[in-house]
Image: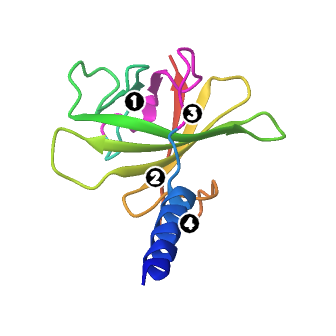
């Protein structure tokens, strides 16, 4: 009986170690951090301004000229990488703290020059590839200010 308990304990420990993934530790000067704007989204159902801060806060504004964000959240960067063409990618989870809702799973892509931010997002699961054609994901594009 002791051997069976020991085997189960080992399996549980090994399983939890294999499935847990640590969050990416962000640097102070991540390419992601800034205010990103798309003036064409003013007056539409997409947020026109996204503010991503090094302190872990995430704000979205309805219009580019708004001073008070209706969306506030805290984010965790899960993963960061650069592809062979020089594009920078981030997998981020945003927890809203202004309303009770599901987290946002965001896959972001920053162009090589660092001035264009694109993302696809959903509340269901983390996107695995940057595919703007999938109906499951919502797509947005912003420009560094």
Q: CA distance from mark 2 to mark 1?
A: 14 Å
Q: Are marks 2 and 3 in contact (CB under 8 Å)?
A: no
Q: Which residue is mark 3?
A: 117
Near-viewer residue (29 or 38): 29
- The residue wearing badge 4 is 134
Q: CA distance from mark 2 to mark 3?
A: 13 Å
Residues marked 1 and 3 touching at CB (< 8 Å):
yes
> In the rendering, at what x and y percent does residue 42 appear?
35, 34
Instruction: Choose the circle earlier in sequence order: 4 or 3.
Output: 3
Q: Which residue is mark 2?
A: 121
Q: Which residues are magenta?
A: 24-43
The residue sitting at 30% across, 38% down in the picture is 43
Marks 4 and 3 in Cβ contact (< 8 Å): no
Residue 97 at x, y = what percent? 20, 38
Q: Mark 4 and mark 1: span between their CA atoms?
A: 23 Å
Does residue 93 sit above or below 75 in this rendering?
A: below
Between 133 and 94, the residue placed more toward the observer is 94
Q: Circle 1 — which element?
A: strand
Labels 4 and 1 touching (C-beta < 8 A): no
* Distance from Cα at disc 2 to Cα at disc 4: 11 Å
Work out whether mark 1 precedes mark 3 in sequence or the reverse, and give the earlier one: 1
Is 26 part of what is drawn in magenta?
yes
Q: Which residue is mark 1?
A: 50
Identify the element where label 2 is drawn: strand
Q: CA distance from mark 1 to mark 3?
A: 10 Å
Residue 95 shows in this picture: yes
């Amino acid at each position: 009986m002791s051997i069976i308990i020991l085997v189960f304990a080992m399996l549980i420990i090994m399983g939890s170690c294999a499935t847990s993934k640590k969050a990416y530790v962000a640097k102070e000067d991540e390419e992601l951090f800034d205010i990103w704007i798309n003036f064409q989204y003013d007056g539409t159902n997409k947020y026109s301004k996204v503010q991503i801060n090094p302190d872990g806060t995430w704000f979205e504004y309805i219009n580019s000229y708004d001073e008070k964000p209706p969306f506030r959240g805290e984010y965790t960067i899960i993963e960061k990488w650069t592809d062979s063409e020089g594009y920078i990618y981030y997998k981020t989870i945003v927890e809203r703290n202004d309303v009770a809702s599901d987290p946002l799973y965001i896959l972001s892509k920053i162009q090589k020059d660092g001035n264009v931010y694109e993302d696809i997002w959903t509340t269901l699961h983390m996107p695995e590839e940057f595919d703007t054609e999938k109906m499951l994901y919502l797509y947005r594009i912003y420009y560094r200010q």
